[in-house]
Every structure is written in C-alpha cells, then in structure tokens.
Image (cartoon, grey):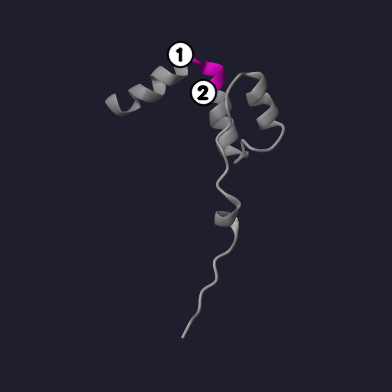
C-alpha cells in the first residue's frame, strides 16, 4: 500500500487537478494545443515548453 500513498495524497490535495491530469493523459491531449492550453492558462499553470523545431524533424539514416 505504500506505493500508492503518493497518488492518494495528490488526489486528496487537489482532486480536480488530479482527475483533469489523469483524463488528459488518458486522452493523450497535448498541453500546447487548445482547449487544454487555454484552460491551463486560466488556471495559472504554465505549460511546458515544446522542444526546439530541429528536434521535431525526422532523422535521415543510411543503410549500407
């Protein structure tokens, strides 16, 4: 039961935020896109910064 204690504490401290994070994770919502981004901004939460554009491009490989 000790393994579940941090999850239970997070749920009991802020149940709405916990459930919102759980649902957005299950639905694989991107915090950089609306409507999640605008909702997080109204809640006063900063959204994580996206990786630089150079990391998003596909890498080329050569097979010999």
Q: Earlier in the sequence, mark 1 or mark 2?
A: 1
Work out whether 7 lies above or below 57: above
Which SS type dominates the magenta stretch?
A: helix
Residue 45: x and y in percent read: 58, 23
Residue drawn at x 35%, y 26% is 4
Residue 28: x and y in percent read: 59, 41
Query: Is mark 1 in CB contact (under 8 Å) with mark 2?
Result: yes
Residue marked by disc 1: 13
- State which quadrant residue 29 falls in: top right
Range shown magenta: 12-17
10 Å crowding of disc 2: few (<14), some (14-19), many (20+): some
Q: Nearer the viewer, residue 36 or 4?
A: 36
Give left or right: position of 3 versus 60: left
Work out whether 7 lies above or below 55: above
- Under circle 2, the secondary element is helix
* Residue 13 part of the magenta-drawn span: yes
Residue marked by disc 2: 18
Residue drawn at x 55%, y 55% is 55
Residue 12: x and y in percent read: 45, 14
Residue drawn at x 59%, y 33% is 24
Work out whether 22 lies above or below 29: above
């Amino acid at each position: 039961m000790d393994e579940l204690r941090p999850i239970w504490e997070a749920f009991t401290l802020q149940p709405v935020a916990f459930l919102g994070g759980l649902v957005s994770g299950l639905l694989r919502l991107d915090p950089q896109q609306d409507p999640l981004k605008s909702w997080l901004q109204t809640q006063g939460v900063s959204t994580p910064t996206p990786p630089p554009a150079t990391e998003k491009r596909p890498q080329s490989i050569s097979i010999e």
